[in-house]
Image (cartoon, coloured by chain):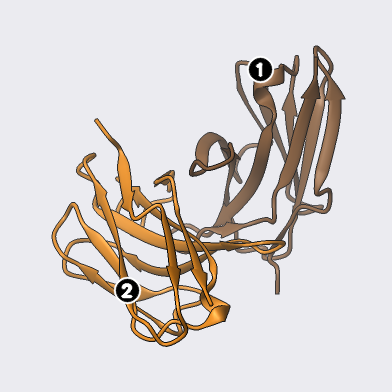
Chain colours: A brown, B orange
Amino acid sequence: DQQVKQNSPSLSVQEGRISILNCDYTNSMFDYFLWYKKYPAEGPTFLISISSIKDKNEDGRFTVFLNKSAKHLSLHIVPSQPGDSAVYFCAAIKTGANNLFFGTGTRLTVIP
Amino acid sequence: NAGVTQTPKFQVLKTGQSMTLQCAQDMNHNSMYWYRQDPGMGLRLIYYSASEGTTDKGEVPNGYNVSRLNKREFSLRLESAAPSQTSVYFCASSEVPSGSSYNEQFFGPGTRLTVL
């Protein structure tokens, strides 16, 4: 039973435009959410996170939005760059737990 | 700093063979984790070690054993490999002990295992 879902396996955007990656979760106990970026043949690397007490967190070109009532979060990348082309994983965890639940990933391709 | 290192990078086994995947981190982290990544499934936690001397099962522990050798090293053992264990295995570490809300994990490059 997938508790964190990324329903779009792939996304293509033009360089300079906005990329929006979406993530849904089913477990209302999750209170911390993370985005990881993964290049081929490498491990995932942490990108940005958000606590459930916030609805937005921004770090440079990356912004994560959280809608708790809809159990939905999204990652916005503005402007998108070719180097952003990677697989993006959404992850969620409950405070005090060790089990980080990952979505299935979205492959972003930024076209020059 | 090398971060999280894993050996080997690739391995092919026959059904029934055993092997140990090695993981080491040089960030002085308390917690270490083993995940597997399968197509269409995302990463799933196999085992974790919240601190040196402790290990606990994750979401998919069957067929695996782990050893937290010291604070730096956390190994994953397949006693009798099965084709269903064909996967990419990632080790991760975190500086935050169990009980905290913040759990950024740092990942190794992965081991691609094929069981024939």
Q: Tell me if residue B108 comes above or below residue B21 in the rendering.
A: above
Q: Mark 2, chain letter?
A: B
Q: Please tell me whether mark 2 sits on a helix, a strand or a loop.
A: strand
Q: State the image coordinates of residue A9 (x, y, percent, origin top left).
A: 80, 49
Asked if residue B2 can be seen in this view, the reply is yes
Q: Quadrant of residue B13?
A: bottom left
Q: Image point 69% across, 56% down: which residue? A: A104
Q: Nearer the viewer, mark 2 or mark 1?
A: 2
Q: State the image coordinates of residue A18 (x, y, percent, origin top left).
A: 82, 21
| Left or right of A15 on screen, residue B65 | left
Q: How many marks?
A: 2
Asked if residue A97 can be seen in this view, the reply is no
Q: Tell me if residue B63 comes above or below residue A41 in the rendering.
A: below
Q: Image point 16% across, 55% down: which residue? A: B71
* Label number found at residue B19: 2
Q: State the image coordinates of residue A90 (x, y, percent, origin top left).
A: 65, 47
Q: Mark 1, chain letter?
A: A
Q: Tell me if residue A88 comes above or below residue B16 in the rendering.
A: above
Are circles 2 and 1 on residues that touch, CB within 8 Å? Answer: no
Q: Amino acid at mark 2?
A: Met
Q: Alpha carbon of mark 2 to alpha carbon of mark 1: how far?
A: 43 Å
Nearer to us in this view, A29 or B8: B8
For label 1, count other residues whose C-alpha is less than 10 Å away and answer few (under 14), some (14-19) or many (20+): few
Q: Please tell me whether mark 1 sits on a helix, a strand or a loop.
A: loop
The residue identified by callout 1 is A61
Q: State the image coordinates of residue B84 (x, y, percent, origin top left).
A: 57, 79
